[in-house]
Image (cartoon, rainbow, N blue to C red):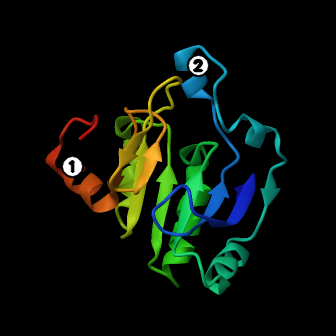
């Protein structure tokens, strides 16, 4: 898988200690929509992209006695979806721990990818673009503060039920 960074132990992005995997692609839609250069992941964009075998990442995760989840974060994981999906498929062969995917997309923008993820259990997706100059808002699902009030997280089971009912996406 191609990544920008791997943080072996993180205590900020999820309520459980997590391994954070920074993904390498983004079209910076947040900045385009707000008209400001405000992305907190801009330094990550300048970092080199490295390729690392999924098995190596999984073994590193499994050998860590502290981490209890994996968080995919910025740049934009869904812009690297096939590699993320392949990783999850391999990870699920050996572990059912929570996987969190931080995305700037709205559910309707990535519906096809969400449908593919519905085959797995114990996945949480954080949706919504960053909006500068907002007060952070606590998200119950993730157990952390999110940067903008339009951002929210949903578990894959809830996403699947919502999609099956054909409900229009938004902050559900």
Closer-to-camera residue (101/86) = 101
Left or right relative to 10: residue 69: left
Mark in the foreground, 2 or 1: 2
Q: Earlier in the sequence, mark 2 or mark 1?
A: 2
Q: Residue at x 61, y 85 (%)?
A: 65
The x, y position of residue 55, in whole percent, is 68, 78
Q: How many marks?
A: 2
The x, y position of residue 91, in whole percent, is 55, 75
Which numbered dot is residue 162? 1
Q: Quadrant of residue 79?
A: top right
Which numbered dot is residue 32? 2
Quadrant of the image containing the N terminus: bottom right
Q: Measure the C-alpha gap from mark 2 to mark 1.
A: 29 Å
Vertical comparison of 124 with 70: above or below = above
SS for dot 1: helix
The x, y position of residue 164, in whole percent, is 19, 51
Q: Residue at x 27, y 37 (%)?
A: 169
The x, y position of residue 159, in whole percent, is 28, 53
Closer-to-camera residue (6/145) = 145
Residue sitting farthest toward the top: 35
Which numbered dot is residue 107? none
Left or right relative to 159: residue 81: right
Residue sitting farthest toward the front: 135
Left or right relative to 41: residue 152: left
Quadrant of the image containing the C terminus: top left
SS for dot 2: helix
Q: Residues within 10 Å of mark 1 (few under 14, many from 20)?
A: some
Residue sitting farthest toward the left: 165
Vertical comparison of 127 with 149: above or below = below
């Amino acid at each position: 898988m191609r990544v920008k960074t791997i943080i072996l132990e993180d205590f900020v992005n999820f309520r459980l200690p997590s391994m954070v995997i920074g993904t390498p692609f983004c079209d910076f839609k947040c900045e385009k929509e707000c008209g400001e250069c405000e992305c907190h992941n801009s330094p990550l964009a300048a970092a080199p992209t490295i390729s690392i075998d999924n098995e190596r990442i999984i073994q590193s995760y499994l050998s860590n006695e502290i981490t209890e989840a994996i968080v995919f974060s910025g740049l934009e994981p869904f812009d690297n979806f096939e590699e993320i999906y392949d990783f999850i498929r391999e990870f699920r062969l050996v572990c059912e721990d929570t996987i969190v995917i931080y995305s700037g997309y709205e559910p309707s923008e990535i519906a096809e990818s969400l449908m593919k993820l519905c085959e797995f259990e114990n996945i949480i997706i954080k949706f919504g673009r960053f909006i500068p100059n907002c007060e952070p808002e606590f998200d119950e699902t993730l157990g952390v503060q999110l940067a903008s009030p339009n951002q929210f997280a949903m578990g894959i089971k809830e996403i699947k039920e919502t999609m099956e009912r054909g409900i229009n996406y938004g902050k559900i």
